[in-house]
Amino acid sequence: MYVSPTTHHKQSKNIAQTLINARMVGFEDKYWLRLDENSCLTHMQPITVPILPEFQENIQDLGGDWLSLGGLDLQINGGLGLAFPEVTRDDLPKLTEICDYLWEQGVDGFCPTIVTTSLENIRRSLSVFAELWANPQPNTAQVLGIHLEGPFLNYEKRGAHPKQHLQPLTLEKLKAVIGDFAPLIKIMTLAPELDPSNGCVEYLHSQDIVVSLGHSLATEDQANKAFAYGASMVTHAFNAMPSLHHREAGMLGAAMVYPEVYCGFIADGQHVNRTMLEVFLRAAQFEKGAFLVSDALAPIGLPDGVYPWDDRQITVTKGTARLDNGTLSGTTLPLFEGVKNLVKWQICDLETAIALATTAPRKALKMATLTTGQPVNLLRWTQKKGEISFSRI
């Protein structure tokens, strides 16, 4: 296929190159690709199609390794010790470091997640991220928009969210939280049963904000009504919601079969039992209805230990974070650890696991994928002796 080039928003590499013997995530057989000096994909053809004479220089043979787009992390709560609900303008240099760190971890874009906190904290964090969002830099992870996880959550399923900052879900309260930041907000997690009219879901949908159901006791019927009003996502499947039951499918069961609803999930071995994770992914048809998130907390990129978390503290052990009372609060494992785990646990093959962290989140946000002709940042994946690694092209 021929893809017409477009202006590249990243720094030019000034070297056009041809990649051969590549297996492309989401495509059958092997391909050759041509990237121009601006890293724009201009040609992508099956390996059986001869390479054009003018593309014979700067050839790189990938030897059948997989190529994919970079990862997207739609739920990450902080990094390098900085919690996103607590950022101030003085933290802009640290936020730049976090973007660089995520880029090194193979992440092209992310949704900084602001969990339930005071309105003052939400507004301040949004104003800081608005500045970062409006000034994207090359060769670093991009802020896709903010994920507001709260404060409109069910008290009984609040998990580690501070109860004193939970809010009733009304249109007035919702607009007070969003303020003038609607263009910046990409996703909002809420409990739909708090607003039986679904007027808030409808309003968010009208503002092009993805509505994700989570921290909720919603029934199957309540979830289906929210989906009908525009909700299209579920936050960290199985966690902070009723489990699947043979007499009441609940919110998650409804989501797994509702067309074009995507469920985020964590594959760290702690948040979801491996067998249930396989059952879930098979029912959700893998990347057709699910996508990986890290749900990483502020200490991602730092060693295990005890760290502050709002006015409390968390203890991180082998990448799992818990409050002092033992409540599971998140992880500090990068997004692609989930890819490696899914393969190690034999839940899916490498291609599918990669897609769950790269293609699937783009589909969940209705973003372009590899076939659109936009400039690309490609990852090369290798699997040798059971070890999975990746590098940027």
Image (tube, rainbow, N blue to C red):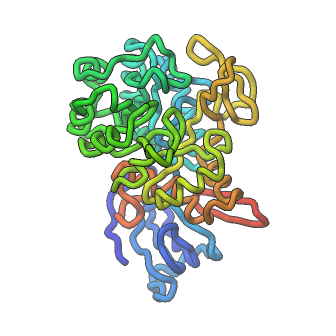
Residue at the (65%, 46%) spot, across then down: 273
Q: Position of residue 85 (x, y in %)?
A: 48, 21
Q: Is 176 on the left-hand or right-hand side of 271? A: left
The quarter of the picture where residue 219 lies is top left
Residue placed farthest to the right in the image? 385
Residue at the (48%, 73%) spot, across then down: 27
Front residue of 230/66: it is: 230
Q: Is residue 269 visible?
A: yes
Q: Position of residue 98 (x, y in %)?
A: 56, 34
In the rendered view, would you say 188 is above or below 11? above
Q: The N terminus is located in which quarter? A: bottom left
Q: Is 330 on the left-hand or right-hand side of 356? A: right
Q: Is 349 on the left-hand or right-hand side of 108? A: right
The quarter of the picture where residue 191 lies is top left
Residue at the (41%, 41%) spot, across then down: 251
Q: The C terminus is located in which quarter? A: bottom right
Q: Position of residue 378 (x, y in %)?
A: 52, 60
The quarter of the picture where residue 52 lies is bottom left
Q: Is residue 128 visible?
A: no
In the rendered view, would you say 284 is above or below 162? below
